Amino acid sequence: MSRRQAVGAHYGLRDWLLQRLTAIVMAVYTLLLLGVALWHGGIDYELWTALFAGGTFKLASFLFMAALVYHAWVGMRNIYMDYIKPVALRLALQTATVAALIAYMGWTIRILWGGA
Amino acid sequence: MTGTERLAVKRRPVYLDLLRIRLPLPGIVSFLHRVSGALLFLFGIPLLLAGTGSSLASAESYGQLKSALAHPLAKLVLVGFVWACVHHFCAGIRHLLLDLHIGVDLVSARRSTAVVAVLSVALTLIIGARLW
């Protein structure tokens, strides 16, 4: 009998590896942003909006959020697998988490390219 | 599959009872890595997006956000957010170093959890002091 579950792990290296790669992406972005803040001795509205007006920074911010969302998915799924025993509840939580994370990506795109 | 391997598969902890677990410091730091991660998912991401959105919308909403964050209660939430970020960051860097086989022996691995715990509280206090 197979012990695999629909809401179990993929029993592979992919998520383990991506958890680390996404962490590195986020760490680099965070340290760069911190570096910019320290270099200018703080961030005011002019610098902040000028930063986000740049196409490269928008793309980097998008990459940061994509990395964050995937990282959060792997982490939350690990938590659910360890502590939530009933399969129906686990599946419901996983579904809600995926829905929230996809919505966050939509929100991100609106902030970055929405022109509001 | 040999008999011992089958036994190992059977004993794999697939479900952990939080109330029955007693942890040493490395376990506490590891657990706080999870707690901070869960908090960042539950509150961190939406707050980050809401904050970034209103800070960029207009100079007016930027100012409103700034004055809202000046409230002592907001600062307290912000300090909690900073701790979750810093702890998760430090514990994560420790994991990456362990993956590179740096500090994997028992003594260094234990010591580095103390470094993570102390460093993240210290950095939180420094950033918190700057906020206030």
Image (tube, grey):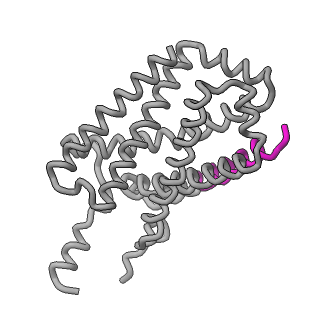
Q: Is residue A101 left or right of residue B79?
A: right
Find residue B66 and report its image quarter.
top right
For image coordinates 50% across by 40% down, the residue present is: B40
Residue B107 locus on image (x, y percent): 14, 49
For image coordinates 65% across by 17% down, the residue present is: B68
Q: Is residue A9 above or below residue A80?
A: below
Q: Is residue A47 above or below residue B40?
A: above
Residue range in magenta is A96-116
For image coordinates 45% across by 21% down, the residue present is: B128
The answer to whether one can see residue B32 in this image is yes
Residue at the right extreme of this rendering: A115
Residue B115 locus on image (x, y percent): 27, 38
Q: Is residue B87 left or right of residue A52?
A: left
Residue A61 locus on image (x, y percent): 66, 47
Residue at the front extreme of this rendering: A39
The answer to whether one can see residue A93 in this image is no
**Closest to the observer: A46 or A98?**
A46
Find residue A81 and report its image quarter.
bottom left
**Closest to the observer: B56 or B43?**
B56
Find residue B22 and report its image quarter.
top left
Residue at the bottom extreme of this rendering: B1
For image coordinates 29% across by 32% down, the residue present is: B118
Asked if residue A98 lies in the magenta stretch, the reply is yes
Q: Is residue A13 left or right of residue B4?
A: right
Secondary structure mostly seen in the magenta stretch: helix
Q: Quadrant of the C terminus of chain A?
A: top right
Residue A77 locus on image (x, y percent): 47, 57
**Closest to the observer: B124 or A15?**
B124
Asked if residue A56 lies in the magenta stretch, the reply is no
Q: Quadrant of the N terminus of chain A?
A: bottom left
